[in-house]
Amino acid sequence: MQIAISQRLATIAVTLATFLFFVILLWRTFGFAPSMLPGYPGDAFFPRLIIGFGLTWCGVLLFRLSRGSDIVVIDEHSEVSVPLRSFSLICCYVLGYVLLLDSIGFEITTFLFVSALFATRLRGNRSQRFFRTLLISFITTIFCWAIFAIVLNVNFPVKLLPNYIDL
């Protein structure tokens, strides 16, 4: 089952949703810690800078779309097809990832998330698809963990790796 939406309406809807998301993020930055030293920006400076950039470009896009000078397509009758089943599955996967991250940890949640994404999209016979899904999910999980934990030094809930490190 697919939903067909005009490309102009889809662009306006996605831009408004993104604009609203940036407004919510901006509102959340007012709860950040103030500057420790007088004259220096606080913790919210760089997030507000990035959010301001995003709000500016969403505003520019909305302004251009409201003026009638459509920057997306020339044809007013262009449509975008949204496969409802795939869209719903991905929304469920993301929601499950967010809800499970704290309880079962980054490694297991990321592995399950990537496995679910690839299991529904890879082609081939069942055994090949299963092996490729496991291999790609494992490599992606280790790569993401290495980038976030080692390179970027991001703290996130881990459940599996600390048990191996303690041995």
Image: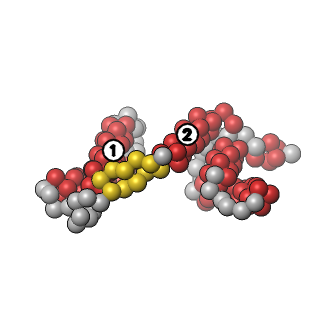
> Does residue 92 sit above or below 68 in this rendering?
above
In-front residue for pair 151/106: 106
Counting the numbered discs, the total is: 2
CA gap between label 1 and label 2 equals: 19 Å
Within the image, what quadrant is residue 108 found in? top right
Residue linked to disc 2: 92
Residue at the image position 27 percent from the left and 63 percent from the top: 72
Residue closer to the observer: 67 or 141: 67
Q: Position of residue 32 (x, y in %)?
A: 39, 38
Q: Is residue 74 above or below residue 140?
A: below
Determine the secondary structure under disc 1.
Answer: helix
Q: Does residue 98 appear in this view?
A: no
Q: Residues within 10 Å of mark 2 (few under 14, many from 20)?
A: few
Residue 8 screen position, x and y as percent? 26, 55
> Residue at the bottom extreme?
74
Seen from the viewer's position, the closer of residues 81 and 96 is 81
Q: How is the image coloured?
A: secondary structure
Identify the amino acid type marked 2.
Cys
Task: Note whether residue 2 is visible.
Answer: yes
Q: Position of residue 65 (x, y in %)?
A: 20, 56
Q: Would you name the residue on which mark 1 appears? A: 17
